[in-house]
Structures are given as structure tokens and as C-alpha cells.
Image (cartoon, grey):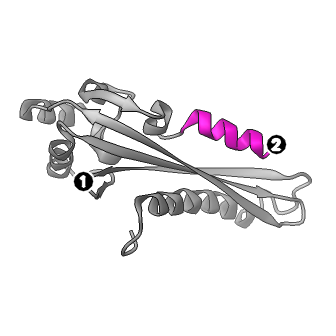
Amino acid sequence: RNSGELPEDFVGRLGLDKAMAGYRALIDQRVLSMPTSPFAVLGADTIVVCEGDILGKPTGEADAAQMLRLLSGRTHSVYTSVSVILSNISGEYSVHSIISKTQVTFRTIQPAEVQWYWQSGEPTDKAGAYGIQGLGAIFVSRIEGSYSGVVGLPLFETSQLLTDLG
């Protein structure tokens, strides 16, 4: 994260970086070196923000436990960015992006639950050390916004973006 960068800007940059990496990989591998029709590449990324801290994927059990203790009994924000790169047959491209923000409230999490949850293996590769689509759902007492955005791809917003792009 760049100094002073807002969460929306940070997650927007991450989603765009992923889309651009996919676009470059296609071009570099010459998979689409001579495209005969326009094509699109989609990239997305998700971050969790609580008390001003951006929570990425945990580096280990202690990091996951710290994140879950921070989220326990609080409301946090989940930002998911989606970027679409549209390319035409002459190699020119345009970038189109959206950001979904969802408020998630956790109930109080007991220390034994933190340990049990880590041992489940679920939080190891999840921003904020939880997956709302799995066992982590037991911690969620309220959600305002896009459930699928918390999972990692806001389906309604992505569908609208793609529809707007034709």
C-alpha cells in the first residue's frame, strides 16, 4: 500500500494490476497476438478494512488470530474491485472498473473458536482471515451490501459493468 493511499484506491489498483497481468500474459504468450475480434480480461481483488487497518491474507496462525480478534464484535468494510480491460483487434485497449463496498459485522468470537477456525484450514488464504462462504459465516451477525463481493466477486456489480460494456 502506498503511503496515504485510501482503501478504495488500493483495492482498485490491485484489481487493475491483476487484469493487466492477465492481459499482458495473453499478449506475451502470443495467444492473442493477432486477435480477430475484440476481447476482454477481468481482474478482481478484495481487501478487509477494520479500524483503519487493511487486512490481507494471514501470514500464519498468530496473524490470523490477531485479525480475528480485531474483527470480533466489530463492523468492518470489505472492498472488492473489478477491472475489465477491453482490447480491440488493433491492440488498443480501455480499462473499466467498479468497486463494491460491504459492511460486515461480527459477533464476539471466543478464543477457542479462533483456534478451531485456524485448524479448519479455511482462513489461510482469505483476506481478513475468514471466508463468509464457509465456516467463517458463523461469525457474521450482519451484512450490508454485496454478499458475493465479500466472497470475492460482486456478481451484481460485475454483471452491470459487463452489460454496460456491451
Quarter of the figure that contains the N terminus: bottom left
Foreground of the two, 62 or 94: 94
Residue 83, position as x, y percentages in the image: 62, 53
Q: Is residue 26 visible in the rendered structure shown here?
A: no
Residue type at mark 2: give it. Answer: Gly
**Quadrant of the rendered structure where residue 96 is?**
bottom right
Residue type at mark 1: give it. Answer: Glu
> Label 2's element?
loop
Residue 52, position as x, y percentages in the image: 28, 58
Magenta span contains residue 160 = yes
* Between marks 2 and 1 in the image, the one whose residue lies nearer the viewer: 1
Where does label 2 land, which residue?
166
**Residue span colored magenta:** 154-166
Residue 98, position as x, y percentages in the image: 60, 50
Residue drawn where x is 72% and y is 62% of the image:
29
- Neighbor class of circle 2 (other Cα within 10 Å; few <14, some 14-19, many 20+) is few
> Label 1's element?
loop
